Amino acid sequence: MNQKSHILYLKAEMSHFGSKSFEGLYRVIAIKDDRSFRELAKVIITSFDLDFDNEYGFYKVDDEGVETGAIFTGDAGTDSEEPVSIRSIIGSVFRKKCQKSSFLYGKQNQWRFSVELVKIIEGCDTIKLPAIVQSCGEVPPPLEDFIYHS
């Protein structure tokens, strides 16, 4: 019996770049639950007009938002992925509404995001996925402006 796929609506909110914090800057992404964390990372990063060419990681968070362990890490500069656990498919981690994780992009510059599952619907073939379904806030100036002028 085939299991029906689901579409996850994930809110990726940019929270920090180094010591600079952001409020109200987010994207809601619709993506199938059988996609990889690498694909999710790429969609998040490119939706904020950043280049997908750095190390990244998704991390478990507790109820207070404190990171408690790695879910998945990878390097966009390579074609390989380094699974931290056997959970390399996003639907194996994001299974219920309001579930959250932390997403770190660039270990040196540290773009930080909060990722929250806001909705799950049964799969639909008429929607081209992944897709940005909501966008809020201005994307910050180029990365160099924060590195040299913060």
Image (spheres, rainbow, N blue to C red):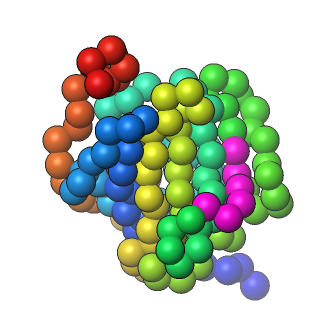
- List x then y, in percent, for residue 103: 53, 51
Q: What secondary structure predominates along the stretch shown in magenta?
A: strand
- Name which residue lies at 78% across and 41% down: 82
- Name which residue lies at 67% across and 80% down: 3
- List x then y, in percent, for residue 99: 51, 76
| Vertical side of 59 occupied by 4: above or below | below
- List x then y, in percent, for residue 101: 54, 63
Q: Is residue 68 left or right of residue 113?
A: right
* Residue 52 visible in the picture: no
- Name which residue lies at 49% across and 28% down: 109
Residue 21 placement: quadrant: top left
- Name the one closer to the observer, 2 or 86: 86
- Name which residue lies at 71% across and 56% down: 70
State which region is magenta: 67-73
* Residue 64 visible in the picture: yes
**Quarter of the N terminus within the rendering:** bottom right
